[in-house]
Amino acid sequence: MFPDARIPYGTWGSSYFPAWQTSPLAEVNIGQFAGEAMARIMGLRKTPVSHLDYLVIGSTVPWHFKFWNATVVASCMGKRVPGYQMEQACATGLQAIILAGAQIQTGASQVAGVLTFDRTSDSPVGVFPERRAYRRTEVISDVWDNFGFDPATGGSMLASAGNVARKYKIEKKEVDELTAHRYEQYFKAKESGFIRRYAVALEVLNMQGKSMGVIEDDIGVKKLSLDTLRSMRELDSCVTGGTQTHAADGMATLLVTNADKAKELSLNPKVDIQFIAKTEVRVAPSMMPEAPAVAVQKLLKQTGLTMNDITVVKDHNPFAINDAVFAKVMNYDWRKMNNTGSPLVWGHPQGPTLTRVTIEALEEAVDLGGGYVLIFGCVRDIGIASIFKVN
């Protein structure tokens, strides 16, 4: 797709993702925090932000001074470079990486930083003039009202999961077993030290520069047993409180460069990470969890690859139903994917979610000796999928 673009190995990192309202991240300007955190992470990776000549940021929840987008975040990072902000709801993290690849492929930049972040805690409430409304105004809580109501369909995200479960005749027993397995995968990766390879403990300061605490864990994530999951009440077909993700706060970052610069900046120059392909599709209204599988079908067709060619499979799975439907559509064993964790367990801050997914997948592929990496997710009734190759 972008033959000249590369992701230098190891020039990435993420905060942990504390659940909403559980950490000092609930009280900060997340844009400022993300910029400062990126500088900290790149310093630890021995890749100072002085190398950057462009910045693509991605977030979905309004934050202080969002109007100034990448310019103010770059100033917080300590390198005044040009850039812009993009957003595509839950697909933001992957789309930002693709856009950075395009920036490199055109020759416009040599080193583009990708910085994605969101704070769902205390999300802003907007008051919109609406002359046609009885009250003359509409008040919207940015996170909760948007997840609870799709103005194109009148339904919620949760209802779309129920719709797909019924269409594909998914049973709650399978969804509970799948979720229990995802928790086992996450805690196994955590106990092995895998997550510490890319996640960085970050201190949060108040306006006076005093410490408010260190974010050093995915706060709010607790082990769930299969028995516990089985006892939970269905909110819609196969969907319970345990088989869906939770809102969270956090950031994730990586670099995209040309091939020569990648060898210079990579923590292991022998590792070569290429962009192969990307696609998006849109399915019927209120069928969100179905969209990623349809996108993957299209992507494999246009590349000539099959699931047997893929070494690492990883997705953004706000509902366990996403993975169950993918397995059914693709005739693929859901036990073979998301081996080192997934958003279903570690949370959903929207903007950085798929960035963290991509980082984990690339680390796993390196451990396995390379191969094709398939990343996919959903944004309302749109499915997005991309393939990278680790040599």
Image (tube, grey):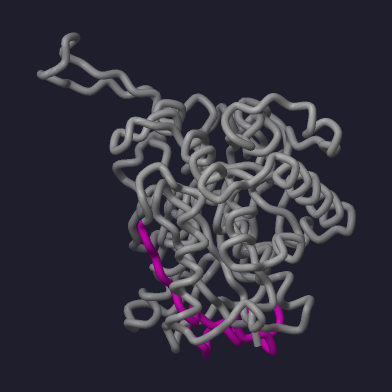
Residue at the right extreme, as displayed: 191
**Lateral position of residue 136 relative to residue 225, left or right:** left
Q: Residue at x 29, y 38 (%)?
A: 152
Q: Tell me if residue 63 comes above or below residue 231 in the rendering.
A: below
Quadrant location of the C terminus? Answer: bottom right
- Kindly identify the residue that appears in the image at 47 percent across and 84 percent down: 303
User: In this view of the protein, which residue sits in the foreground, 246 or 41?
Assistant: 246
Image coordinates for residue 218, horizontal then vertical, percent: 73, 41
Position of 130 relative to 247 (above/below)? above
The answer to whether residue 115 shows anywhere in this view is no
Q: Please report the residue visible at 67 percent of the width from the left and 67 percent of the height from the top.
A: 332
Camera-nearest residue between 92 and 314: 314
Residue projecting furthest to the top: 135
**Which is more toward the observer, 182 or 216?**
182
Question: Would residue 271 be counted in the magenta stretch?
Answer: yes
180 vs 269, left or right, is right
Q: Is residue 43 above or below residue 205?
A: below
Count of numbered marks: 0
Per the rendered image, the range of residues in magenta is 257-282
Image position, residue 97 (x, y; %): 47, 66
Residue 178 percent coordinates (x, y): 74, 49
Q: Residue at x 54, y 83 (%)?
A: 274
Image coordinates for residue 62, horizontal then vertical, percent:
38, 36
Q: Quadrant of the N terminus?
A: bottom left
The residue furthest left is: 131
106 is higher (above) or lower (below) than 205? below
